[in-house]
Image (spheres, rainbow, N blue to C red):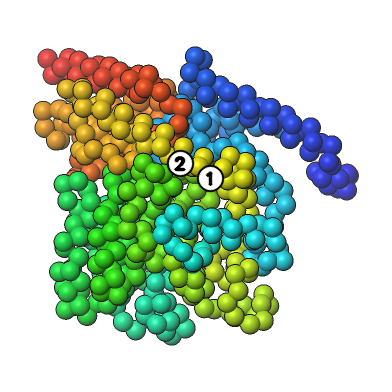
Amino acid sequence: MEESALRKLYDPEIFRRQGHDLIDHLADSLKASLNAEDLIKVTNGVNPQDEYEFWMSNSYFDVDQFFRTITERSIKLHHLRFMGHQVSPPAPLSVLASLQGAFLNNGMALFEMGPAASALERMVVEKFRSYFGFHQGTGVMTSGGTIANLTALICARNVKAKGVLWNEGQTENYAFMVSDEAHYCIDRAVKIMVWGDRGLIRIPVDDQFRMRTDLLEENLIKAQQKGVIVLGVIGSAPSTSSGIYDDLDAIGSFCSEHHLWYHIDAAHGGPAAFSEKFKYLMSGSQKANSITVDAHKMMMTPALTTMLLFRDDEDSFRTFAQKAQYLWNESEEEWFNYGKRTLECTKVMLSIRVWVLIQTYGIDIFEKYLDACYQLGRTFADMIRKESCLELPVSPDSNIVCFRVRAANNLLSDNINRQIRNKVYQEGKFYIVQTTLNGNVYLRVSLMNPFTTTNDLKSLIHSIKIIYENLTTEQNELFN
Ligand SMILES: *Cc1c(COP(=O)(O)O)cnc(C)c1O
C-alpha cells in the first residue's frame, strides 16, 4: 500500500497526463485574460475570512479540479485590466523554464549542484551589466529585490567598514542615506543589521518626489557630528510608491566625492537602461557600486527572479566572509560556487528563466516590453489631465501612475479615494491599488500588461467616475 502510493506519486505517465492537462488549462486561462472581447474578472474581490472558509468547507478533492479552482480564485496577472502591484504577467516561455527548474531542483549553492544554471547565471549578469555602464563586474541572482538589497548593503558594510564587523560585531554607529520615499525593505535591511533608527538617514524629497540631493552634504555633516559613520547612499529607480526616479547621476557624484558606497535600488525600473527611449532615467548608473534589478517586475519572468550587479568584481565576493568547511575547502574567490555570495543556500534555478527569453526573442524583447508599459503610463497621465475631477501629483517617469479624485479638501479626498479603491477591488473588473504621498491618499496603477489598450484605461476612468458619483449621491442623501 505504502509502496504503491509512492510509485504512483512518481509515475512518469501520470505526470505526463496531469502536466498536459495543466498546461492546456493555463493556456486557456491566458487566452481568456488577454481577450478583450470576453472579459473575465481580474479578481474576485473576496475578503480573507470568506476565502479561508471556502477552502475549509471544500472537502472534495480532484487534482484537475484543484488546479482549475486555484486559477479561478487567484488574481489574474495576465489580465488586460490588472494594474495593481508591480509584478509582471510572466511570459509563458519563462514559466516553462521555471517548471523545468522546479523539476530538476538543482540547488545551486555549489556549482556541482547546478552546473548549467550556474554558468548561465554568470552569462545573464555579463549580458546586462554593460547597459548600466559596468564593464567588468559580476553579480548574483537572488530570490527577490529584498534579499538583493540586503545583500548589497551587507557588502557595502563589509567593504566600507573594512570587514571587521562580520567577525567582530558592531563597534561603531553606522548609517545609510536614502530618500524618504524609498521602499520599506531598505529600512528593514538596516534594522536587520541592528543599526536602529539612526542607521537610516531619510532625505526629504522635492515637489517632484525626487531625493533632495542638495541636502545630502548637510545630512552627512550632521551625522558625523553625532558620531554616526555614513557608509553609503541608496538611490531609488524608481521609488515604488510614486514611480519617480531619483537623480541617479547627482547621487553618484556625491558618493564619489565622499568615498561612499552607492547602491541603486532599481528593482522596478532598472530595465529602463535597455531602452533607447527611456535609458535617460538610469543615467548615472555607471557610478553605482551595486544595482538591484527584479526580472519579475519589468522583465516578464515569474517571481522571484532578481539580479544584483556589482561594478567591481571583487565586491561581489565580499558580502559573506564566513566559511562553511564542509562546502568548500578554501575561501578563494571563484565565480561558480554561488552559495558563497548570496544569503540563500539552496537556490532556485533563476538564470534559465531569463536566458531562455534572451535566446529565443533577442535581448531587445525587454526594451519592447518596457517601452510599451512606460508609454502606457504617459498615455494614462494625459487622459487624467483631461478630467476635471481627477488630478496627478506628478507626471509619471514610468508605468507607475498615481492620481486621485479631487474633492473639496484633502481630508474628504482621502476618504473618497479610499472608498473608490475598495469599491474597484470589490467589483473585480480592474485591479488598482492605493498609496500615500505627502500624507494624502492616492489611487495608483502599475501598467504591467503591454497589451492594455487606451480603451481599458478609458473604462477605468469611467468606472471611477461612476463610483464617485454614486458615493456623492449616497452621501448627499445621508446628510439631507
Ligand atoms: C519591488 C521592490 C522591492 C522589493 O523587491 P521584491 O522582489 O518584492 O523583494 C524593493 N525596492 C523597490 C524599489 C521595489 O520596487
Q: Foreground: 161 or 427?
A: 161
Q: Amino acid at mark 2?
A: Glu
Instruction: Tell whether label 2 touches label 1 (CB within 8 Å).
Output: yes
**Quadrant, the C terminus:** top left
The dot on residue 367 is 2
Q: CA distance from mark 1 to mark 2?
A: 8 Å
State left or right for residue 174 relative to residue 335.
left
Residue located at (52% from left, 78% from top)? 321
Residue located at (68% from left, 66% from top)? 111
Q: Is mark 2 within 8 Å of ligand 1?
A: no
Q: Give the percent coordinates (x, y) of residue 451.
A: 46, 27
In which quadrant of the rendered view does residue 427 lie? Answer: top left
Residue located at (26% from left, 19% from top)? 465
Q: Give the residue at mark 1.
A: 363
Q: Give the percent coordinates (x, y) of residue 292.
A: 43, 57
Q: Secondary structure at mark 1?
A: loop
State left or right for residue 7 relative to residue 273.
right
Q: Give the percent coordinates (x, y) of residue 202.
A: 23, 61
Q: Amino acid at mark 1?
A: Ile
Q: Foreground: 333 or 28?
A: 333
Q: Secondary structure at mark 2?
A: helix
In which quadrant of the rendered view does residue 158 lie? Answer: bottom left
* Relative vertical location of residue 52 with respect to residue 238 in this rendering, above or below: above
